[in-house]
Image (cartoon, helix red, strand yellow):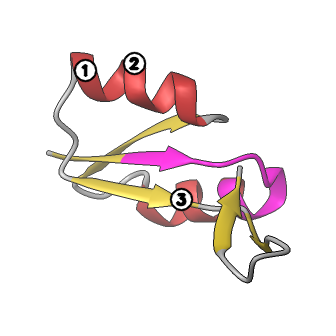
Amino acid sequence: MKEILLVGNLKKEDSAISNIFNGGDYRVLKVNNATKAIKLLRQNSPDFVLCTGRIQQTSEGLYFLEL
């Protein structure tokens, strides 16, 4: 069984993504922030990490994912 780590805080979108993968050959582990994701990554070795959130831009023009 493949493991997917889903990191994000968009409840509606995260629920839809989780429903797509659950029930097949996938196990979905969900966390809502980067700190929890790092802790989980130290304990497990998921096959795939998927992040949901909003893409923001700093005043310097750099982009980042807001979880």
Identified by mark 2, the residue type is: Lys
Tag 1, which secondary structure? Answer: helix
The residue positioned 66% from the left and 75% from the top of the image is 63
Q: What x and y, as percent, mark residue 43?
A: 24, 16
The residue positioned 76% from the left and 77% from the top of the image is 60
Q: CA–CA distance between discs 1 and 2?
A: 5 Å
Q: Are marks 1 and 2 in contact (CB under 8 Å)?
A: yes
Range drawn in magenta: 5-14
Q: What x and y, as percent, mark residue 5?
A: 39, 44
Q: What x and y, as percent, mark residue 61?
A: 73, 83
Identified by mark 3, the residue type is: Cys
The residue indicated by pointer 3 is 51
Question: How many C-alpha atoms fall within 10 Å of the one at disc 1: few (<14), some, or many (≥20)?
Answer: few
Q: CA–CA distance between discs 2 and 3?
A: 15 Å
Question: How many C-alpha atoms fall within 10 Å of the one at disc 2: few (<14), some, or many (≥20)?
Answer: few
Report the residue that reaches farthest toward the bottom: 61
Question: How many C-alpha atoms fall within 10 Å of the one at disc 3: few (<14), some, or many (≥20)?
Answer: some
Asked whether residue 7 is drawn in magenta, I would say yes
Sequence-earlier tag: 3 or 1: 1
Of residues 25 and 57, the one nearer the viewer is 57
Tag 3, which secondary structure? Answer: strand
The residue indicated by pointer 2 is 39
Q: What x and y, as percent, mark residue 6?
A: 49, 48
The residue indicated by pointer 1 is 42
Q: CA–CA distance between discs 3 and 1?
A: 17 Å
